[in-house]
Image (tube, rainbow, N blue to C red):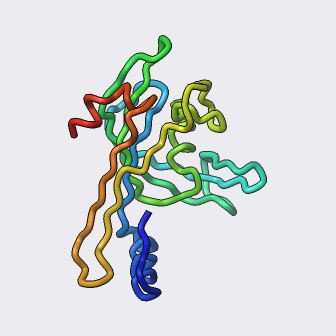
Amino acid sequence: MVYARSAKAAAALSAQIQENRFQKEYFAVVQGSMQPPRGVLQDYLYHDKRKGKAYAVKSLRKGVKQAELEYKTLAEAAQNGETISLVWVRLHTGRFHQIRAQFAARKMPLLGDGRYGSREKGCGTALFSCGVGFAAPAGGKEVFVRQMPPRAFPWNVFAEALYDL
């Protein structure tokens, strides 16, 4: 989370978000094996406000927005007889439940995300905001802040891949 110290700084950061110059990166653990192991996902997402859920749909219509993210598989592991994958994600757009909806649309829900199809009960939704990048409002210096997820399930399954970065 980024806090601004003044209204002017808040406006500058908001402008960067609106102009897609604010970088947001995440780690996610998905059920299955991403094919291809790296790429870009592009979908139209519909935000159903009544159900509090987003759905990938085939065409633009009222309430539908384009969504795009970039991903890279960092590691895979076996869990309860199934493959799970640690995936790094960079958002190109910021839509409601975007990461959750885009992976679920490919039958690869985030581990622990029952709302989008996961049957794993041993953890919460396996999505972790690991980095933000932006131009500092005062002076324009590029800032990037990175954070690692806790050493708890499911992140600890991928300790080698995560904590040796």
Which percent across, then down, holds residue 72? 32, 39
Quadrant occupied by the C terminus: top left
Which percent across, then down, holds residue 104? 56, 36
The answer to whether 121 is drawn above or below residue 110 in the figure is: above
Number of callouts:
0
View extreme (right): residue? 50
The answer to which quarter of the image holds residue 76 is top left
Quadrant occupied by the N terminus: bottom left
At x 61%, y 57%, the residue is 60
At x 53%, y 50%, the residue is 98
View extreme (front): residue? 151
Front-most of residues 34 and 8: 8
Front-most of residues 22 and 92: 22
The answer to which quarter of the image holds residue 74 is top left
The answer to whether 141 is drawn above or below residue 8 in the figure is: above
Front-most of residues 121 and 105: 121
Front-most of residues 34 and 144: 144
Q: Please indicate whether residue 105 sits to the left or right of residue 6 in the image.
A: right
The answer to whether 13 is drawn above or below residue 120 in the figure is: below
Q: Please indicate whether residue 45 sits to the left or right of residue 130 in the image.
A: right
Which percent across, then down, holds residue 133? 31, 64
At x 45%, y 76%, the residue is 14
The answer to which quarter of the image holds residue 117 is top right
Which percent across, then down, holds residue 71? 36, 43
View extreme (top): residue? 81
Q: Please indicate whether residue 134 sits to the left or right of residue 115 in the image.
A: left
